[in-house]
Image (cartoon, rainbow, N blue to C red):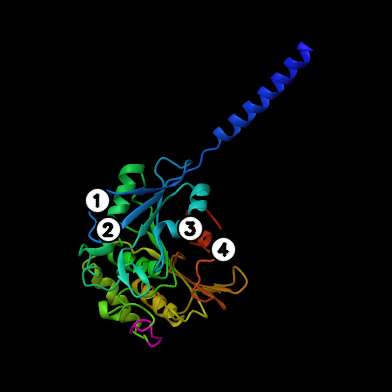
């Protein structure tokens, strides 16, 4: 009887130990808010996701939400954090605080925001990048920007203003840099930028980028662009304007080097330089409305950044 009781006790103890040991071995990173990250003229909030498994100097991806959203919301609704776990990069999720007709949006319209070092959200975002580099050992030679809608607009914006900070970008449903003339021209859909009639020449678009950082002669960040053909909030026609802007910045032809269909209903156009490097890449998503990125698209974005393969 004593033996039977002892066996039962040992069995119960082993089960209890198993229940304690296995959960304790599972460790998962979490989204953390940073309240004092440096100069913050935009009054923005910063959240950061730092995966448990990462190299000594991980890349940094700035992932930006759409109007009315938030950093934590984009963290939950996009695939960038799960990709960070797989590929070992840091993700910064800024939260815009500028109030517009669709809620809080990233400032891509004010005079301050269009000037390098001029203030507003762009300066705050660069502060976040520097904080991530200093605090988590992030690699300042591998900093990338991506975002949806307002965040896609800010992606174009940051690559124009800070080509020395960002190495590439992936803009979902964005607009070209300097598309919004002023604060009165925002937000969509009633603005001159997004009313469906915007049509500047490639030279005009390219000049806008070059004038954002006069005298800059260094390398330009590569750009990936995404838009749904059925988007009525930020018209699909603006994808062509973005293509014209960035191909002009790189001195490339408006004709794609080649096109393909990596997924059903996806048309990808690539614009390569004479060395064969794809500097601009554009995705037309047939039938998609104002709803990007959808499943799998974030993987193509980070692959474009050079953070693993798709």
Residue 150 position, x and y percent, is 38, 69
- What residue does disc 2 label? 124
For label 3, the crowd category at 10 Å Cα-Cα, with few meaning under 14, some 14 to 19 and many 20 or more, is many
Q: Which mark is residue 302?
A: 3
- Front residue (pair 204, 33): 33
For label 4, the crowd category at 10 Å Cα-Cα, with few meaning under 14, some 14 to 19 and many 20 or more, is few
What span is in magenta? 190-197
Q: Which mark is residue 295?
A: 4
Q: Residue furthest bottom?
A: 197
Q: Which circle, 1 or 3, is nearer the viewer? A: 1
Mark 4, secondary structure of its residue: loop
Q: Along the polypeptide, which appears first: circle 1 or circle 3?
A: 1
Q: CA distance from mark 4 to mark 2?
A: 29 Å
- What residue does disc 1 label? 38
Check if mark 1's residue and mark 3's residue have beta carbons within 8 Å.
Answer: no
Q: Residue furthest top?
A: 2
């Amino acid at each position: 009887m004593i033996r039977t009781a002892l066996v039962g006790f040992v069995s119960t103890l082993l089960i209890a130990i198993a229940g304690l040991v296995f959960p304790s071995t599972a460790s998962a990173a979490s989204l953390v808010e940073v309240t004092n990250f440096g100069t913050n003229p935009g009054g923005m909030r910063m959240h950061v996701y730092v995966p448990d498994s990462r190299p000594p100097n991980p890349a940094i991806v700035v992932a930006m939400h759409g109007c009315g959203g938030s950093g934590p919301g984009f963290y939950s609704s996009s695939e960038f954090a799960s990709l960070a776990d797989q590929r070992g990069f840091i993700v910064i999720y800024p939260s815009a605080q500028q109030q517009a007709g669709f809620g809080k949006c990233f400032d891509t319209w004010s005079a301050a925001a269009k000037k390098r070092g001029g203030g507003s959200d762009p300066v705050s975002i660069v502060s976040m990048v520097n904080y991530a580099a200093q605090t988590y050992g992030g690699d300042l030679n591998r900093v990338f920007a991506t975002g949806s809608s307002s965040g896609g607009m800010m992606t174009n914006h940051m690559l124009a203003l800070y080509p020395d900070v960002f190495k590439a970008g992936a803009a979902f449903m964005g607009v070209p840099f300097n598309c919004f003339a002023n604060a009165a021209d925002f937000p969509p859909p009633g603005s001159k930028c997004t009313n469906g009639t915007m049509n500047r020449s490639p030279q005009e678009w390219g000049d806008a980028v070059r004038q954002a950082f006069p005298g800059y002669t260094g390398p330009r960040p590569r750009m990936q662009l995404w838009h749904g053909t059925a988007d009525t909030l930020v018209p699909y026609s603006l994808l062509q304007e973005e293509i014209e802007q960035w191909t002009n910045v790189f001195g490339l032809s408006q004709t794609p080097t080649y096109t393909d269909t990596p997924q059903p209903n996806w048309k990808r156009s690539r614009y390569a330089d004479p060395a064969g490097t794809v500097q601009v890449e554009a995705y037309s998503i047939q039938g998609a409305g104002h709803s990007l990125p959808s499943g799998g698209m974030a993987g193509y974005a980070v692959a474009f950044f050079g953070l693993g393969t798709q």
